Amino acid sequence: MLKKNSRLILGIDPGTALVGWGLVRQQGSRLSVQAHGCIKNPPQMPQSERLLRIYEQLTEVIAEHRPDAVAVEQLFFSKNVTTGISVAQARGVILLTAIQAGVTLAEYRPDQIKTSVCGYGRADKKQVQLMVKRLLGLKEIVKSDDTADALATAICHAHSSILDRVKIKK
């Protein structure tokens, strides 16, 4: 039996070839991993089929685990606008999937996630992986960058909600 203050957060790192996802159980200030994975789309798959596959597999994850909240990394455009547009389409599918499932939705900038997990908004992938391991009490680093980023997004949401409760108590 789970305690009343327990909730399950699904973090998602959007992409078109790879969509990382991770479920983090929050019980008060204690965090633990429930499950994680990656939706992998073959490189030759057309974009429309990739988006459908993301929708179908994410719908299955949500139906199976029934998270209380979904936290999604916001899009950051660097130099490749074409890739950014494809990822934006995937984010749209991800947001729609969460909304259709009736799950509370939150979005975080990459620098917010890195600051929440590492204390530094420009942390590199390796630092994020190491802190995810430490914060979730894992024996090994999560090898997939996308999955580690998804777990970091869930951790960021958990930290944000802890801060929100502290603010409310004042």
Image (cartoon, rainbow, N blue to C red):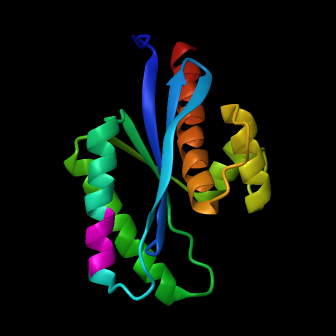
In depth, the one of 170 and 39 nearer the eye is 39
Q: How many marks?
A: 0
Q: Horizontal and vertical percent for residue 7?
A: 43, 25
Above or below, comparing residue 135 to residue 100 in the picture: above
In this rendering, position of residue 30 left or right of residue 125: left
Whether residue 170 is visible, yes or no, is yes
In this rendering, position of residue 34 left or right of residue 29: left
* Residue farthest to the left, as pictured: 100
Q: Is residue 12 magenta?
A: no
Residue at 27%, 52% (x, y): give it: 59
In this rendering, position of residue 144 left or right of residue 130: left
On the rendered image, what quadrant is the N terminus found in?
A: top left
Residue at 61%, 47% (x, y): give it: 152
Q: Horizontal and vertical percent for residue 60?
A: 28, 50
On the rendered image, what quadrant is the C terminus found in?
A: top right
Q: Horizontal and vertical percent for residue 63?
A: 26, 42
Q: Horizontal and vertical percent for residue 103?
A: 29, 40
In this rendering, position of residue 39 left or right of residue 144: left
Whether residue 122 is visible, yes or no, is no
Q: Main secondary structure of the magenta part?
A: helix
In depth, the one of 71 and 42 nearer the eye is 42
Residue at 23%, 41% (x, y): give it: 102
Above or below, comparing residue 119 to residue 26 in the picture: below
In depth, the one of 100 and 121 nearer the eye is 100
Above or below, comparing residue 36 to residue 145 in the picture: above
Which span is picked out in magenta?
A: 49-54
Q: Quadrant of residue 16?
A: bottom left
Q: Quadrant of residue 70?
A: top left
